[in-house]
Image (tube, rainbow, N blue to C red):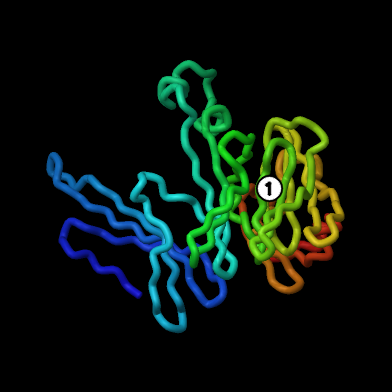
Amino acid sequence: ASWEPENDNEVYRCGFYGLSFGKAYLTVSKETYAMKDGQAVSVKEENSKCSFDLETGELVEIVNDADGILPALYGVWKDVAVYQTVKTAEGAPELEDWLAQQPEGTTSYQYGLQYYEYRLYAKNLKTGEERTIVDESENFVWTADPHKSWGQYVVYQVGRSVYVYDMETQTVKELFTYDQDWKNYNYMILDGHVIAICGTGDTCRAWAIDIADESVVELDTRGGNAITITPEYECNDYIVGLLANQTGKVEEYYISKEDFYRSNYDGIFS
């Protein structure tokens, strides 16, 4: 598949989300430029999400930003996709005005915690039927981690509880609840486990929860303020993760899954 601009002032970009059941899921962006003060300036952007059948070559647009919002794709399994949308609460101040009144070091992330409203929903890509998983009135906790789905499961957090949504059975399971009201949360899903992380600026705790049997193992963070090795991807027996070396540079390292869940970081190798 390819996308070619029709005019000289247009540019196409294609972002790859992932593969599921023989289809590639893509985000296609078309930007239109105009000359202003001798420089090319983007004046219009159109985005859509598409599925591309790798066997037949069939390209299908599954959603676009005609309404001004392109939902984020959380996961896809067979004909079911899970999306997340966000909007600013009614009556919220402008971000720039709010930041100007906050202590130094305050970021837009804190603004989002206070004023963003999220919706998480499942959509059947054949029938168009939608099912709300989390509505905009609930205290949805967003994660920056890219690992939001694994196989047929999607992970998300509401309040202090972490849930998995099964796209195959269209069911929800509450998997883990933080035992303290920490300030910062993060979570991810990989290798059939949800990794839940919480802490403050100086401390961190992390747990690995098995989706199948719901067993919980606390991961040793060695007293640091972050998880010791952050998983990036996996194969049958190993996890590839990010770890700061002795010089402080973050690099990829390997660890067996057995050692990772036992917090045996002596088993890390590069």
Between 103 and 175, the residue placed more toward the observer is 175
Q: Tell me: 86 left or right of 12.
A: right
* Residue located at (81% from left, 63% from top): 267
* Residue located at (79% from left, 53% from top): 208
Residue to which mark 1 is pinned: 187
Looking at the picture, does residue 80 appear above or below residue 186?
below
| Viewer can see residue 41 | yes
Q: What percent of the width, then of the height, locates residue 135?
A: 58, 41
Quadrant of the frame with the C terminus: bottom right
The amino acid sitting under disc 1 is Tyr
Q: What percent of the width, then of the height, locates residue 142?
A: 60, 42
Between 128 and 229, the residue placed more toward the observer is 128
**Label 1 neighbourhood size at 10 Å, few (<14), some (14-19), many (20+)?**
many
* Residue located at (47% from left, 66% from top): 25
* Residue located at (35% from left, 75% from top): 1
Between 166 and 8, the residue placed more toward the observer is 166
| Viewer can see residue 243 | no
Q: Quadrant of residue 170?
A: bottom right
Q: What percent of the width, then of the height, locates residue 138?
A: 63, 36
Looking at the picture, does residue 34 appear above or below residue 210?
above
Looking at the picture, does residue 188 appear above or below residue 199?
below
Between 212 and 230, the residue placed more toward the observer is 212
Looking at the picture, does residue 43 appear above or below residue 60?
above
